[in-house]
Amino acid sequence: MSCALPAFAAASQTDPAPPFAVLMELTHRCPLRCPYCSNPVALDTASAELDTATWKRVLDEAADVGALQVHFSGGEPCVRKDLEDLVAHATEIGLYSNLITSAVLLDQPRLERLQRAGLQHVQISLQDAEAGGADRVGGFKGGHAKKLEVARAVVAQGLALTINAVLHRHNIDRVNDVIDLAMDLGAGRIEIANVQYYGWALANRAALMPSREQLLAMDAAVRARLPELAGRIVVDYVVPDYYARRPKSCMGGWARRFMNVTPRGRVLPCHAAETIPGLAFETVHDRSLSDIWRDGPAFTRYRGTDWMPDPCRSCDHKEEDWGGCRCQALALAGSADATDPVCELSPAHADVAMLRDRDAAALGTEWTYRGL
Amino acid sequence: MNAVAPHVAETDRLRLAPGVMLRNDRRRDQWMLMGPERLLVLDEMALAVVRACVGPDAADVAAGIDRLTVEYDAPRTEVAADVLEMLTDLRNKGYVVT
């Protein structure tokens, strides 16, 4: 996740600045089965999910720690019947609510209830610009048409709409169509989200990785359109990791902007952090979000710059990209303590190109759908 | 190639985009524009421009510039240039719409 947010000043030398937002993964349940899902490969079951009262307490604690926004996410958050209740509670305590959804379970009456509860913004994922490809990737027949219907209802109701368009080998050539579709729907913002290879996507990398030619064509198409799109739709776009020369500032820096709470209540610095061995995660049953944010061992482990090895330690960009992504360092360099190998200064950078080119050439590889 | 989006003009009428609100965060003692998955911290000048030129009741941008010219006792051409640049930036970032 990239981030263009201001850093807040710390209240003191010892306490970290408060987070901007808390991502609440209300559930891992989802009717879609996208092979690039960012959920962990080991999904939480419905019976393990926090109950309504506990989520409300977590919302209170999110406000207490100083977060300004809450992102209701999943899985598909709309499978939770208490979603309206949780949005209303967030509104009551002054939190700004975003809904991150596949939209296939939404309809106009429920959108109206959510808006009355104070919901401000709906982010809808699209799997492609056309129904055939989209429904095949999502593994859900009729899903694409339903998404378009709900997206139009979101705009008609005066809610903010973001389209999250996930790109990979099978749809990257239609990036212009996806942008046109987002504009036609009346979205205020589009995230051109090239698949990030964590969780299910990492397992399916050989079935999803685009070729260098595809990537260059997509990049040129997007850059050519940016001037005409200015003022019409906000475009969030970054060069995808495996083709980049410098790493993204993942999550705006480890434990600097975001907290993530999983369906069963584990509190993480990012949604993929559970892949990192040796990190101890607390739950919402152990301590408050404020305590965990301040000195939880998983949060302090990679916060700031003290943990950094070279080349990060002596790099001028260390407080811009914060060493990149810890989960990616683990996946590609074998250690979460390493510089993100997406960086061309990393000794493992050449390995990224090798893995990328190998997987990009593995045409015909079938993906594995997400499933329990 | 399509045309580049024009700058905000004095004749435009601006309002906050859907999902955007002006908020004061007491804990941080900061005014900000809060929007979808983002926020923009406003300094004193930016806050004055938003208050003068954006909102359901705001007249056109020119009226806001007139008001700021009086308020800050500055040459109108300079005020207008700064204000239009700031508003164009706010529009391009999705915080305000025409």
Image (spheres, grey):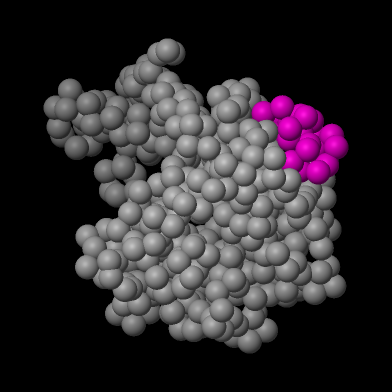
**Picture coordinates of residue B42 (x, y %)?**
34, 48
Tell me which corner region of the image, top left, top right, bottom left or bottom right, holds residue B95.
top left
Please tell me whether residue B42 is drawn above or below residue A61 in the rendered image. Answer: above
Residue B78 as seen in the image, left or right of residue A331: left
Residue A42 as seen in the image, left or right of residue B81: right
Predominant SS along the magenta part: helix
Please tell me whether residue A167 is drawn above or below residue B42 in the rendered image. Answer: above
Residue A51 as seen in the image, left or right of residue B82: right
Along the viewing direction, whichever of A217 and B65 lies nearer the viewer: A217
Tell how many labels: 0
**Image point 39% across, 55% down: which residue?**
A350
Question: Residue extending furthest bottom?
Answer: A286
**Picture coordinates of residue B24 (x, y %)?**
43, 55
Residue A133 as seen in the image, left or right of residue A232: right
**Picture coordinates of residue A79 (x, y %)?**
82, 55
**Image point 40% across, 47% down: which residue?**
A244
Q: Find the magenta span and give its range.
A: A129-155
Is A134 a magenta residue? yes
Along the viewing direction, whichever of A294 and A315 lies nearer the viewer: A315
Is A294 a magenta residue? no
